[in-house]
Image (cartoon, rainbow, N blue to C red):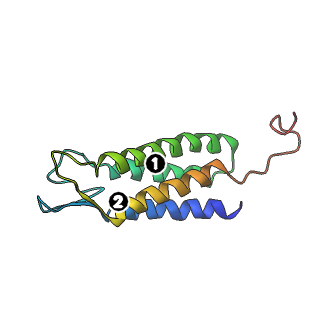
Amino acid sequence: MRFLKWAGALAAVLLVISCFLPWITISTKNILLTGVDTTGTNFGKPGYFHFVTAGFFLLLNFIPRIWAKRWNLLVIGLNTGWALRNFLLIPACSAGICPNREIGLYLMAFSSVVMLLAGLFPQMKLPANSPETSS
């Protein structure tokens, strides 16, 4: 699973890029929403939380300590939950207006799942006399 560390890093970069791509279009109001530009709606700026979690993920992903891998589980859990929220809530139909999902929303969800897989299966070499290896 050595490649998962680098796949997770690439997914974090893809997550940041996907926040600048179009997430949804509302054709009746002529609005194009991205993760950082939600002008005309009250969604806030959902991409900024992805920036924070991607930064922490990259930092913790390359620290070869067990505590970093454990904190990384919290970070990717929060990121995946936020991605699920964005994927379900932002393109939901409201008042008879159904927006169209765009490529950025799908890339955001895909990269969050890849980051989750990379964090769930870290590459760790534990010392022979550590308490985690003796059972």
- Residue at image x 69%, y 45%? 65
- Residue at image x 55%, y 57%? 114
Residue 85 spot, x, y in % from top left: 38, 44
Residue 58 shows up from this direction: no
Residue 11 spot, x, y in % from top left: 51, 62
- Residue at image x 54%, y 39%? 74
Quarter that holds the C terminus: top right
Residue 121 spot, x, y in % from top left: 67, 51
Disc number for residue 70: none
Residue 53 spot, x, y in % from top left: 46, 48
Inspect the image, locate mark 1, and give the three-letter code of the amino acid beneath it.
Thr
Residue 79 shows up from this direction: yes
Query: Alpha-carbon neighbours of circle 2 within 10 Å: few (<14), some, or many (≥20)?
Result: many
Inspect the image, locate mark 2, and give the three-letter code of the amino acid beneath it.
Cys
Quarter that holds the N terminus: bottom right
State the separation of the CA atoms marked 1 and 2: 13 Å
Q: Which residue is mark 2?
A: 19
In the drawing, does residue 101 fall left or right of residue 61?
left
Judge by depth and name the residue closer to the eye, 70 or 127: 70
- Residue at image x 35%, y 59%? 19
Where disc 2 sits, the SS reads: loop
Where disc 1 sits, the SS reads: helix
Q: Which residue is mark 1?
A: 53
